[in-house]
Amino acid sequence: MRNSRSDDTAAPLLSIVVPVYRSEKILPLLVKKSLETATALGLADQFELILVNDCSPDNSWTVIAALANEYSFVRGVSLRRNFGQHNAVMAGLHHANGRFVVVMDDDLQHPPEAIGEIIAALSGGFDVCYTHYAGRQHALWKVMGSRFNDAVATLLLNKPRGLYLSSFKGLRREVVQEVIRYDGPYAYVDGLILDITRSITSVRIQHQPRHEGEGNYNLRRSISLWLKMATSFSVLPLRVATLTGFALSAISALIILFILLEKLLNPDLPRGWASLIATVLFVGGIQTMCLGVMGEYIGRSYLKLNKKPQFVIANTTWQAEQPP
């Protein structure tokens, strides 16, 4: 069955958006399980599976094109370079047409069988439904990093306590339309969701072991995602830098008064070279940190003003005449 669906056809009830990177061996099984789940829900003819190739270095795009040629519900989007998971999700959301849109990873650690529970929650009136893992199949450093990220998100984004910001989630169409209005180069989907709505729930799922290969999120990418969340959707780091500056100024003033008093009471007191250098290095380090925080904000604003793209599409399976 060749993928012949166009944007002017009747919109499906369900859209499943999957960012793809190094998953050529997993994709056929992912498509099969997605079809089985849709069939079990009675949505075999009312869903679409949007696979967004984030410039994967393997043959993922070739596999996506072949699957789209075989299954009419598969729609493939290929990006010109690697833009990152959240930007790839944004590209998929721009092409999703369903009343309900589910976002999930490509490694089958997110069981498609849980989509029914997500749709039920959204049908019940919630704008967004996240999933909460039972028995996470991740390395210890990644689990601890997620907990740190969760705590920071609660502080910076005013995230409801107890809500886990999973990459496996469902959104109503109205929320998706608001999310894709964001055109900045550093997309953080969960931050956008929390800016739009507080009508959010979650369902508990069993986290599955990765079907093939290793996870694509390393420490560097995790830190990059944290910085994106911290500097793109909150001004709290700037406020912390400001308050730190005021606090250090007050402490410095007190230290100066203390030193002057000591000098008046003990004229023969030798000058403290070590304490002076320590103070200079400490204050200099704080100043450098604050300048770095401000520079991060300024740099992101500069790139947005210069219209750095959020993503660039190289090809789609329904417009094969475009160059690869």
Image (cartoon, rainbow, N blue to C red):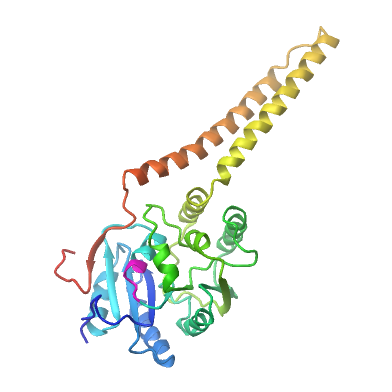
Residue 22 visible in the shown view: no
Residue 262 point in image, percent of width and height: 82, 15
Tell me if 49 is positioned left or right of 40 in this view.
left
Residue placed most toward the observer, 229 or 143: 229
Q: Quadrant of the C terminus?
A: bottom left
Residue 151 visible in the shown view: yes
Tell me if 247 is positioned left or right of 134 in this view.
right
Q: Residue at x 57, y 78 (%)?
A: 203
Residue placed most toward the observer, 250 or 78: 250
Residue 28, quarter of picture: bottom left
**Type of secondary structure dominating the magenta stretch:** helix
The furthest residue to the left: 321
Q: Quadrant of the N terminus?
A: bottom left
Residue placed most toward the observer, 193 or 147: 193
User: What stretch of residues is rendered in magenta?
Assistant: 92-97
Residue 174 point in image, percent of width and height: 43, 71
Q: Residue at x 29, y 66 (%)?
A: 58
Residue 110 point in image, percent of width and height: 48, 76
